[in-house]
Amino acid sequence: MSKDEWKNHYELLRQAYIYYLHAIKQKEKDEACVKIQRELEWAPFEELCFKHSAPIYGIRKYGLDCVSEKCIDLIDKRAKGEIKYEL
């Protein structure tokens, strides 16, 4: 995994999550959940989520839960250099 590849997936995840947080209509939230799940299924992110028991395969259908959001937060903190987390 290259640094650029990681940054690209992180940026797509970040944009989808921001869209989710600001969505007003349910359809917008659903669209964001599809994008979020797609990015979290990327192998390095998926591994992190599994380590934290985040049910990422239900996001598209059921939305985000607090464990999935915690994983997104960990990915975000790693991207910002706030934590050192090996993916």
Image: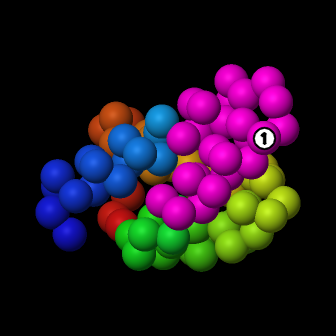
* Residue under pointer 1: 27
Query: Is residue 78 among the parts visible in the rendering?
Result: no
Location of residue 17 in the rendering, given as x and y in whole percent from the top left corner = 58, 39
Q: Residue at x 17, y 55 (%)?
A: 3
Query: Is residue 5 among the parts visible in the rendering?
Result: yes
Q: Decide which of 55, 60 is in the foreground and name it.
A: 60
Does 78 sit left or right of 19 as displayed? left
Please rate how many residues cluster around mark 1, counting C-alpha atoms within 10 Å: few if below 14, some from 14 to 19, many from 20: few
**Which quarter of the image is occupied by the N terminus?**
bottom left
Q: Residue at x 72, y 37 (%)?
A: 28
Q: Main secondary structure of the magenta part?
A: helix
- Report if residue 27 lies within the magenta region: yes
> Vertically, is 42 above or below 8?
below
Location of residue 15 in the rendering, given as x and y in whole percent from the top left corner = 48, 36
> Vertically, is 33 above or below 48?
above
Secondary element under disc 1, as helix, strand or loop, is: helix
Location of residue 62 in the rendering, given as x and y in whole percent from the top left corner = 84, 60
Q: Residue at x 64, y 45 (%)?
A: 32
- Report if residue 23 lies within the magenta region: yes
Location of residue 35 in the rendering, given as x and y in whole percent from the top left corner = 56, 53
What count of labels does the image hold?
1
